[in-house]
Image: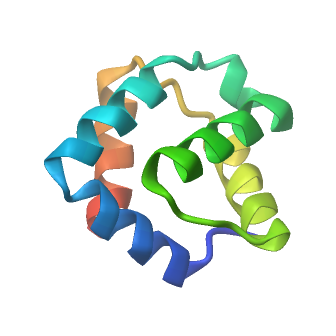
Amino acid sequence: MGLDPRLLDVFRAKIANPMNWRRVHHCLMSYSQWDLANPDGAGALVDNLSGVLGVPLTPAQRAGAVNWIVGQRINPRNPLHQMRMWSVVNGY
């Protein structure tokens, strides 16, 4: 189970708004690599982003996003990881 492509398109559109981007960036920077390495921390991030952007998630979409985040081994404070995630958001 991975990211729902339609859901990713919705998040991309919402993050394109500069006011949302600031809130998303603040949200992301509040998590550590260790938080995102486990399903509880990744789930908290998914829930937080969903709330910040006003995007409701089904349980299946949430589970897919959590599994994807844990599998990416993201460190939100690492500039290389930030660029990689920006590429995902922009669809590169």
Indicate the quadrant containing the N terminus: top left, top right, bottom left or bottom right: bottom right
Q: In x, y percent, where is residue 68?
A: 68, 55
Q: In x, y percent, where is residue 69?
A: 64, 46
Q: For this rendering, which residue is in front, 63 or 82?
A: 63
Residue sitting at 53 percent across and 75 percent down? Answer: 7
Q: For this rendering, which residue is in front, 43 or 2?
A: 43
Q: Is residue 54 above or below residue 73?
A: below
Q: For this rendering, which residue is in front, 91 or 26?
A: 26
Q: For this rendering, which residue is in front, 36 or 30?
A: 30
Residue found farthest to the left: 18
Q: Quadrant of residue 37?
A: top right
Q: Is residue 67 above or below residue 76?
A: below
Q: In x, y percent, where is residue 32?
A: 58, 16
Report the label total.
Answer: 0
Q: In screen coordinates, is 79 left or right of 65?
A: left
Q: In screen coordinates, is 80 left or right of 37?
A: left
Residue sitting at 40 percent across and 76 percent down? Answer: 9
Residue sitting at 57 percent across and 20 percent down? Answer: 31
Q: What is the basis of the colouring in this image?
A: rainbow
Q: In x, y percent, where is residue 84?
A: 35, 45
Q: Is residue 87 above or below residue 9?
A: above
Q: Is residue 20 above or below residue 91?
A: above
Indicate the quadrant containing the C terminus: top left, top right, bottom left or bottom right: bottom left
Q: In screen coordinates, is 49 left or right of 44?
A: left
